[in-house]
Image: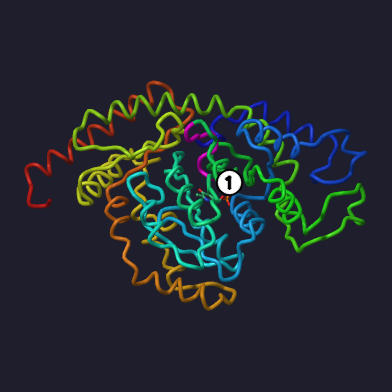
Amino acid sequence: MPGFELFGEEERKELNDVMETGILMRYGFDGPRKGIWKSIELEKEIANRCGCKHVQLTSSGTSALTTALAALNIGAGDEVIMPSFTFVASFEAVLSVGAVPVIVDVDDTLTLDPSAVRAAITPKTKCVMPVHMCGSMAEMDALKQICDERNLILLEDACQSLGATYKGKALGTIGHAGTFSFDFVKTVTCAEGGAVITNNEEVYTKCDGYTDHGHDHKGVDRGADLHPFLGYNFRISELHAAVGLAQIRKLDTFLSIQRKNHTALKKMLSQIPEISFRRIPDEAGDSCTFLSWFLPTEELTRAVVAEMKAQNIIAGNMYWFDNNWHYIRGWSHLKNAAALNNLTDPQKNALLKLQTTSFAASDAIISRCVSTLINLSWTEEQLKDKGTKMLAAIKKVLQEELVAPARL
Ligand SMILES: *Cc1c(COP(=O)(O)O)cnc(C)c1O
């Protein structure tokens, strides 16, 4: 990851097909487009790849989440349970449809802790939104059971985990709907784009209309289309879909490179007894975009991150605890309800309450976690070099801490 590491002739060819007709829009212009329908082709590829019935492309992963929430009839007054560790897009989408994000702890899977979800359910809860962070999965059996028991909607934010599976099923296909992102740093990228996937035809039809101002897409004349409900413009362009099409055809190659590099790096880091690894509910389904690992304390983790930074081997190593975009600790704008538009009272109250909510269980995990990005373009030598340098930096810090145990 990311897919742009392996851009090549394939992406150029798909783009040229579109430029030859000049029809950059996914709808209409049936004659002049001469049979070139990149968005439709990409939707079919994703459906095949994920083993799901319906795919709706969107302009981004964020708009895919918004579209899915709207199509699942989640809105004003509804509570959506989501994790403290995700990208800000997850709560942006929830707020945009008028719903209330209810943020709960993650566990050592780096995803929703099922017991925290159970404890957060109220009569207003309508949806549980697990986020499959960093290429791997949430505990879907436990979460699905909770949703089935309590009659809740299960919406999977799989934006970071295209190609990953849980017990043989593609992530995003286990809940009522799932979403992907094809932004510039994702596994498959087309610069900006996203998708909603679902097996429910009615949900799909709503996504199809919602992303295009409510068009019912039943005729050949756009001007004569009916608008059974209000929509928005979350359309993808043919240029973006063309790049996405070339990229998704490389997904299996990406996955096999990631798995190989991930295995090699994990084996190296396993030599250090103080290191433990993220718990993966189904190891075989990990897309291996990141290797996420823990040290025993926050202090040791901070010291190791500082040492790797000093040695310039930090690139691609992420210490989420200090990151402003992925962890609750850094979401001051959310906790201050600093929105440009007026929020509803339930939204405002829920956000301000976050200022005094304890996320001690999440802190205990995330403060000790480092994720190392698994690149596609590493040569064997570069991979070995990276692992060797990481090992040396970690051992150096552990050694220093042993002689100065007071710091622990
Ligand atoms: C990237 C991402 C999104 C949003 O995708 P964009 O295409 O950047 O809008 C949503 N959720 C998660 C977990 C993401 O990583």
The prevailing secondary structure element of the residues shown in magenta is loop
Q: Which residues are magenta?
A: 159-167
Q: Disc 1 marks which residue?
A: 178
Residue at the top extreme, as displayed: 380
Residue 405 locus on image (x, y percent): 8, 47
Residue 299 locus on image (x, y percent): 20, 51
Does the magenta-highlighted stretch encompass residue 166? Answer: yes
SS at badge 1: strand
Examine the image and state in which quarter residue 215 appears. bottom right
Residue at the image point whose x is 56% and y is 71% from the top = 77
Q: Please name whichever residue, 130 or 202, is drawn nearer the observer in this view of the structure.
A: 202
Residue 405 as seen in the image, left or right of residue 219? left
Marks counted in the figure total: 1
**Kind of residue at badge 1:** Gly
Relative height, residue 394 to residue 263 (above, below)? below
Examine the image and state in which quarter residue 4 appears. top right
Relative height, residue 407 to residue 386 (above, below)? below
- CB of residue at label 1: within 8 Å of ligand 1? no
Residue 83 locus on image (x, y percent): 43, 55
Does the magenta-highlighted stretch encompass residue 80? Answer: no
Residue at the image point whose x is 74% and y is 61% from the top = 231
Residue 49 as seen in the image, left or right of residue 316? right
Display colour scheme: rainbow
Q: Please name whichever residue, 302 or 339, is drawn nearer the observer in this view of the structure.
A: 339
Residue 198 locus on image (x, y percent): 64, 44
Residue at the image point whose x is 31% and y is 46% from the top = 369
Examine the image and state in which quarter residue 99 appears. bottom right
